[in-house]
Image (tube, helix red, strand yellow):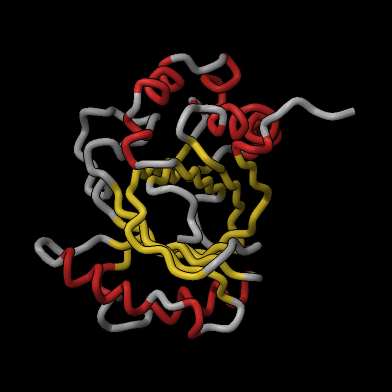
Amino acid sequence: MPLAGKGMLLTSMDVDREHEADFNRWYDREHLEERVAIAGFIEARRYVAEEGAPKYLSLYSTETFEVLGSPAYRKALANQTAWSKQNIARFKNMIRGVARITISRGKGRGAALGIIRIRPAHGGHDILRDSLRAALDPKSSDGVISMHMIENDPVLSKPLTDNPAAADPGASDWFVLIDATDVMPADAAVRRLTDNIAFKPMVVSSGTYRLLWDIARADIKADIS
């Protein structure tokens, strides 16, 4: 599988313009590296929207899905730094998906990401999964490197800024992820799927994002100077 591991944490949010510089500094200087350092985490990627919302998106790959409910991860959530608490409190329109990677086709990662949020019809999960497995073929689209699907766990997929006891109709949503060489082929691939009559009624939202940077666990070593 081109996506490392079996689990994925997806987070997406907006932040007010007045706090945006500090938000980006925190993500770039502390947060991504801190998360990838947790046992079982493999890599993390940061994106900014070209078209779509929320504006910022991050993907974290884990060795297994169970890592996302592990004592090490729960400890990290319970012991946020002061800088983290300050920025998390500023999140708006947050999406947080704790998911299993169920489809991953192709090889490599792209400079752009297409994303489609899908809300499966009750009882139609197996049929939809089989249909998407056939549709997510990167070889059918120039500029598309790999295509994936992740399925949220409804219990663990709760925004950190919301009431954890409140019902969330999107907690069981799925996300299609399209790695592409540029925004245009990512957008074209998104539109082909969202215009498909078989999938269109289940589409909640879609967008295209540009990669800001990524970090792997192997990168977290002492600097050589």
- Position of residue 27 relative to residue 172, above or below, is above
What residue do we see at 67% from left, 50% from top? 212
Quarter occupied by the C terminus: top right
Q: Nearer the viewer, residue 183 or 15?
A: 183
Image side of residue 2 versus residue 130, left or right: right
Quarter occupied by the N terminus: bottom left
What residue do we see at 47% from left, 28% from top? 39
Percent position of residue 19, x then y: 64, 32
Percent position of residue 220, x then y: 67, 31
What residue do we see at 28% from left, 83% from top? 197
- Position of residue 126 relative to residue 167, above or below, is below
The answer to which image quadrant residue 218 occupies is top right
Question: Looking at the image, which residue sits at the far left?
Answer: 123
- Position of residue 105 relative to residue 213, above or below, is below
- Position of residue 223 relative to residue 128, above or below, is above
Image side of residue 173 versus residue 49, left or right: left
Count the labels in the image.
0
